[in-house]
Image (cartoon, rainbow, N blue to C red):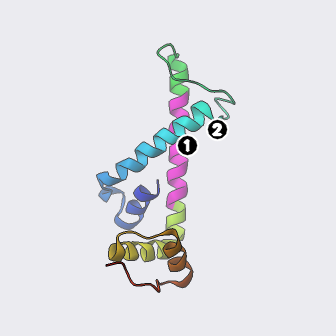
Amino acid sequence: MGGRAAEEVVYGREQVTSGAMSDIQAATKAAHEMIRHCGFSDKIGLVSLPQSNEESAETRAMVDTEVRSFIEQAHSRAMELLQKRRSELELLARALVERETLTGDEVRELLSKGRLTTAPPV
């Protein structure tokens, strides 16, 4: 949910682009897997629930409610972290505009030193 949350922090909720859609899709898929197969929901329990046509409407509704809750919690957490660390967000955004991509090492350097010491690739 980081990309969508970052757009909300920087541009406001009304200006979120459709590019943030992939965050929602990925989060929904991950939450479904976590709830249906990995036992991450106290309400569903430590069971695996393969989706089938025979699944009750009540079970589908319970899973959907849990998925929504997981995603809303993830979004809230992402918003909280990005607001708290807004200066790092801005630093990363400027570096990405300049370089387009960053390696893990470059991100660590940027966040620890406040700048990159290597020249951008040509």
Which residue is painted at 53% across and 50% down in the image?
Answer: 74
Residue under numbered circle 1: 70
The residue sitting at 55% across, 56% down in the picture is 77
Position above or below: 28 against 37: below
Quarter placement of the C terminus: bottom left
Percent from the top left, x then y, of residue 83? 50, 67
Magenta residue check for 64:
yes
Quarter of the image for residue 10 reads bottom left
Q: For the point 55% across and 27% down, which residue is it? A: 62
Observer-nearest of 100 and 93: 100
In space, the residues marked 2 and 1 are separated at their CA atoms by 10 Å
Name the residue carrying label 2.
40
Task: Find residue 110 and report its horizontal and vertical position in percent.
Answer: 50, 79
Mark 1 falls on what kind of element?
helix
Residue ranking furthest to the top: 54
Locate residue 89, reporting x and y percent: 46, 71
The quadrant holding residue 45 is: top right
- Identify the residue at image location x=32%, y=53%: 19
Query: Badges 2 and 1: C-beta atoms under 8 Å apart?
Result: yes
First reached walking from the N terminus: tag 2 or tag 1: 2
Q: Given the image, on which type of amino acid does mark 1 rest?
A: Phe
Residue at disc 2, secondary structure: loop
Most frequent secondary structure within the magenta stretch: helix
CA neighbours of label 1 inside 10 A, class few (<14), some (14 to 19), many (20+): many
Q: What range is drawn magenta here?
A: 63-79
